[in-house]
Amino acid sequence: MITPAEGPDRVRRAAIANLGCKVNQAEMDAVERLLRARGVNLVDGRESADLVLVNTCAVTAIADRKSRQAIRRARRNNPGAHVLVTGCSVAVDPALLAAVDPAARLLDNESKDRLLEEIEALLRLPDGQSLPTLSGVEWGAGLEAQPEANAADPGGGRAFEIGAGGGSFEDDFETGASIDRTRAFIKVQDGCSFHCTYCIIPRARGPARSVAAEVVLAEVRRARSAGHREVVLTGINVGSYFDAGLDLPGLVRRILAETDVERVRLSSIEPQHLTDDLLDVWAGSTGRCLAHFHVPLQSGDDTILRRMGRRYDSRSYAALVERVRRALPATAVHADLIVGFPGEDDAAWARTLAFLRGLDLAGLHVFRYSARPGTPAARMVGQVDARTKKRRAAEALTLAAEARARFAERQIGAEMRVLFERQLPDGRWLGHAECHVLTTAAAPDGESLDNAIGLVRGESIDPGAPDRVVAHLLAVDPARIGPGPAERAQ
């Protein structure tokens, strides 16, 4: 193990602890690519490292606490390492994080836009020199500040987005970053210019700004050349994308027309941004845009939605879900839910449960409300006690599990195209269908389905996982550009 004084040019092993949303995932994917390209060996947090990067999350109190725990663990396991700490917790309370590890280098989210340059500098410094202080950081290359509102940006709350996949989560924050071997997360937007009353992210991430379209296209092409067959477009409020007259539907049209990427998915999109124009892009994409939308709801009670500062009511949300299903009948709609928001009494909670049952969603992500310092909701009367929040979260998680199982059951007899991601211990291959449902299939004669797209027919539900489909493999498209995941992992 080296010490910082011995010289960053001798960094040979690095670890990444990543918490929070898919924007964080996309940012850390870029860091991992840089480190690998510079010959740095990526290790997990249990192994010794010369450099540890902790990407924090502040969206809930639990996320904040886990961020601090990750910093302590990084220093405890690697007392002589360079520790770089970035992300939303740094932006919200840098003094607290500095107290956790005074030797760590803190980079807030504006500085994060220059993170790759910082790491390049770290790897190239001569012996005995320390990393220079940041100065003059603006939005970073490829990022342009957006106005508060414009005619092409219909506005709305940010995407309250944590975790991945089609399952349900309750304050669940993973702390191990690794590049997804089959899909690439492409950051197209950052920040939010709208202020839901519970949300600290506008303070942590700054105002909405969009990555230039040419930069996005270059990233999609890079992902394609690296062998990724699916890209996930991600941002803090991805639907507010606007660059030089180009909105999100226009950006996706350019991706479809100017790249050969096979599958395009959105990480999350606010209800008011899921427009007819965007649905037209999906409908006309010949299957390249995947039949899956994650649309935050947060509450099914209109009074609570108003207190949250959301820009829709339950009726308009339900109408949106129906509009999506008319335009794209096979589409899965997932939602987010915050339970225990101030003022949510038993009657409001009962209305939310009834509303959720009527929506017949494909999945639901569940979070207990967490008061964030400085937000209007933290000062509201009617704070809900922890025991009630826990009970309601359990009720919502039961609904979520039922929704996932019900949607999986509907795929029996249906044909789906599955991007296979990994092999299970029993030899079957596991991947996500277009509708994001987890699907398993056996390969003929022990053939590898690593990064293959298979046409399958759903046959049954996995006995060990009620939200997972067991399918029969009908055909395989193994074509890929660039090295496959197994080769890239080496």
Image (cartoon, helix red, strand yellow):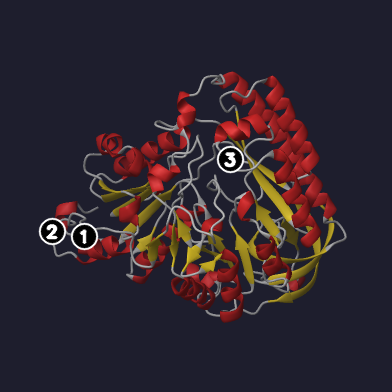
Pointer 3 or 2: first along the chain: 2
Point out the residue furthest to the right here: 413
Neighbour class for label 2 at 10 Å: few (<14), some, many (≥20)? some
Which residue position holds label 1?
A: 8
Instruction: Say which residue appears at 25% left-offset and 50% top-offset.
Output: 81
- Label 1 or label 3, whichever lies nearer to me, is 3
Instruction: Say which residue appears at 28% left-offset and 35% top-offset.
Output: 100
> In screen coordinates, is 390 left or right of 74?
right
Neighbour class for label 3 at 10 Å: few (<14), some, many (≥20)? many
Pointer 2 or 1: first along the chain: 1
Q: Is residue 49 visible?
A: no
Which residue position holds label 3?
A: 310
Q: Is residue 424 above or below residue 467?
A: below
Task: Find residue 215 and report its image quarter.
Answer: bottom left
Q: CA distance from mark 3 to mark 2?
A: 49 Å
Amino acid bearing label 2? Gln
Q: CA distance from mark 2 to mark 1?
A: 8 Å
Task: Find residue 265 and report its image quarter.
Answer: bottom right
Foreground residue among 65 and 429: 65
